[in-house]
């Protein structure tokens, strides 16, 4: 059976090439990708999730061009980045891909993000949302936005408190150049699956409650390389995997 793209509705044209994409392929990405796809399918089935209900977003921050090119060759057409300058360099070599900004948002970077990204998953302040809206070019479709929630209350993590997520969602939903898609979180790292699931369960409950207020919401972005199976068990629709696919970051 033919493999399906990892992220639905992404462009499928051949990758645009440049000199830096002509590095030798990263040969261990293919088996890792196959194993991850199998684990996702198995986890969907084990928890009563429909096949294909979980999208995999490869996190390519800190990864070399060769790794991205190899992932693209294997059918990956969307990537997550956290640093604007690094992302712009990669976009110039893979303009047919869809790009998600998943890092902390600074006011002096919002214009570049609004002009170049398809998604921003880390909106945590109304002021940032307004800047993204005002700086989104009129010729582009609305910017897809997830509100980031700080589930663990960590001062080092971005995100609104769970109790404040609805208010920020309302602000995003009123802005015409933004499209509210859902919630995102990066919880504090814990190793026990029961503890992981407990945290994810809180976000999932709020997501399902907010979907009754904002029916257009369709994305619950939670789960990374160390905890994505717990996230799938609790209802994640998108998981963000970096090291599980690419190995340790190169930068």
Image (cartoon, rainbow, N blue to C red):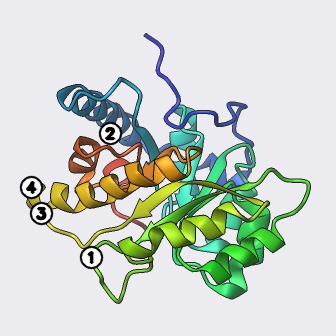
- Residue at position x 48%, y 47% from top? 212
Classify residue 229 as left or right of residue 166. Answer: left
Chain-order first, disc 2 or disc 4: 2
3 vs 2, front mark: 3
Q: Which mark is residue 191?
A: 3
- The residue shown at (58%, 73%) is 83
- Kindly report the distance in space between the C-alpha atoms of the residues bearing marks 2 and 4: 25 Å
Label 1 neighbour load within 10 Å: few <14, some 14-19, many 20+: some
Q: Position of residue 75 (x, y in %)?
A: 54, 32
Residue under label 1: 152
Q: Helix, strand or loop at disc 4?
A: helix
Q: Which residue is mark 2?
A: 32
Asked if one can make out residue 75 in the rendered structure from this viewpoint, the answer is: yes
Instruction: Find residue 59 and name its label.
Output: none
Front-most of 60 and 147? 147
Q: Give the foreground label among 4 and 3.
A: 4
Residue 224 visible somewhere in the drawing: no
- Residue sticking out furthest to the right: 139
Q: Is residue 167 above or below residue 57?
A: below
Neighbor class of circle 4 (other Cα within 10 Å; few <14, some 14-19, many 20+) is few
Q: Are marks 2 and 4 in contact (CB under 8 Å)?
A: no
Along the viewing direction, whichever of 242 and 189 lies nearer the viewer: 189
Taking the image as shown, residue 36 lies to the left or right of residue 105, namely: left
Mark 3 vs 1, N-terminal side? 1
- Residue highlighted by disc 4: 194
What's the distance in space between the residues labelled 3 and 1, CA to CA? 15 Å
Labels 1 & 2 near each other (Cβ < 8 A):
no
Q: Nearer the viewer, mark 1 or mark 2?
A: 1
Residue 241, percent from left and from top: 38, 52
């Amino acid at each position: 059976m033919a493999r399906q793209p990892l992220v639905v509705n992404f462009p499928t044209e051949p990758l645009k090439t440049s000199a830096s994409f002509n590095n030798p392929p990263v040969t261990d990405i293919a088996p890792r990708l196959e194993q991850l796809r199998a684990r996702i399918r198995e986890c969907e089935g084990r928890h009563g999730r429909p096949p294909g209900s979980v999208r995999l977003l490869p996190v390519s921050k800190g990864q070399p061009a060769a790794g991205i090119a190899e992932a693209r060759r294997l059918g990956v057409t969307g990537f997550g980045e956290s640093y604007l300058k690094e992302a712009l360099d990669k976009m110039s070599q893979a303009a047919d891909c869809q790009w998600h900004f998943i890092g902390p948002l600074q006011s002096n970077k919002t214009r570049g993000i609004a002009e170049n990204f398809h998604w921003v998953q880390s909106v945590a302040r109304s002021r940032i949302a307004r800047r993204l809206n005002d700086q989104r070019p009129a010729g582009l479709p609305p910017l897809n936005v997830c509100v980031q929630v700080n589930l663990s209350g960590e001062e080092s993590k971005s995100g609104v408190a769970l109790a404040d997520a609805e208010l920020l969602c309302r602000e995003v939903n009123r802005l015409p150049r933004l499209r509210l898609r859902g919630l995102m979180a990066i919880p504090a790292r814990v190793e026990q699956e029961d503890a992981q699931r407990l945290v994810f369960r809180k976000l999932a409950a709020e997501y399902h409650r907010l979907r009754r207020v904002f029916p257009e919401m369709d994305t619950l972005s939670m789960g990374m390389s160390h905890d994505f199976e717990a996230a799938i068990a609790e209802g994640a629709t998108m998981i963000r995997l970096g090291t599980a696919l690419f190995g340790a970051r190169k930068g």
